[in-house]
Amino acid sequence: MKNIVITGTSRGIGFEMVKLFSEAGYNVLALSRNSKPISNLKLDNVTALEFDIANESEIVKLSAYLQTKMTSVDVLINNAGFLVNKPFAEITSEEFKRCYDVNVFGVATLIKTTLPFMKKTGHIVNISSMGGVQGSVKFSGLSAYSSSKGALITLTELLAEEYKETGPSFNVLALGAVQTEMLEEAFPGFEAPLSATEMAQYVMDFSLKGNKFYNGKILQVSSSTP
């Protein structure tokens, strides 16, 4: 039975992924600042741990859990994200920094903590955005968010190169429009062609099998970009 670690599980795609992995019989560690949405479901083989990816001091909680409870990790899905939707001139330095703390620095720290427990055949999947892909359509108000997601894409490519001989594999999914709370915050009133559950199923399947075919790749998962 494979061990799966997922961040950003209190809502949206992450929330749906935890349910899908549980139904399929996998062991899941669900990390989120708010653990109640998952813990209230009382799912089989799922542990919900309150965890702020932007707070380095909380890494101790994750490390302790991995050492004593999970001991090995097959899949890490870095799904947590922080969005600021404001004109560039109005974004505070704290908001800009928070975007990078969650979307880049927190992911890097989480990967570094998890790597000693990852198998050579393991797979680390980073969830980015079409807004972070060079040459894609860009939108006003998303300078902090989209630029941080672009940094995550480059980080993924670099880690895949650095660990290509020893594993695990690293890939990044640049998602387009999915009907989530975060999409509503970025594009109020827009109706996406995909539900959170549909995208969660895609990410789950890719995390389990995609590293057989890809390493260090950016996959643009987008049927529609607002």
Image (tube, rainbow, N blue to C red):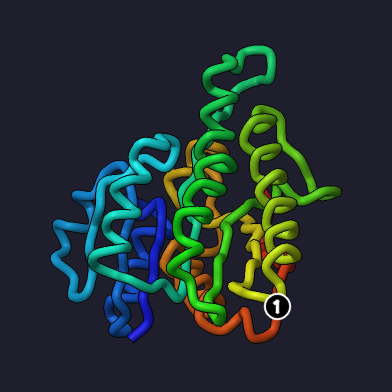
Query: Residue 51, relative to residue 206: is it above or below?
Result: above
Left or right, 98 with respect to 170, comes to left
Quadrant (top left/top right/bottom left/bottom right) for the N terminus: bottom left
Q: Name the residue nearer the viewer: 60 or 98.
A: 60
Q: Residue at x 36, y 40 (%)?
A: 52
Q: Is residue 43 left or right of residue 188?
A: left
Within-10-Å neighbours for mark 1: few <14, some 14–19, many 20+: some
The image quadrant that residue 168 belongs to is bottom right
Based on the displayed image, in which of its 4 quarters is residue 92 positioned?
top right
Which residue is depicted at the point 23% across and 49% down? 35
Residue 107 or residue 136, whichever sits in front: 107
- Rendered location of residue 133, percent (x, y): 76, 51
Name which residue lies at 30% across and 63% down. Answer: 67
- Residue 124 lies in quadrant: bottom right
Number of marks present in the image shown: 1
Q: Position of residue 174 (x, y in %)?
A: 66, 58
Q: Nearer the viewer, residue 154 or 59?
A: 59
Q: Residue at x 66, y 49 (%)?
A: 152
Q: Amino acid at mark 1?
A: Tyr
With respect to residue 193, does 189 lie above or below? above
Q: Is residue 132 above or below residue 40?
A: above
Please tell me whether mark 1 sits on a helix, a strand or a loop. Answer: loop
Q: With respect to residue 223, does 201 lie above or below? A: below
Residue 156 in the image: state x and y as whole percent.
68, 57
Residue bearing mark 1:
214
Residue sticking out furthest to the right: 135
From the viewer's side, name the closer residue of 61 and 215: 61
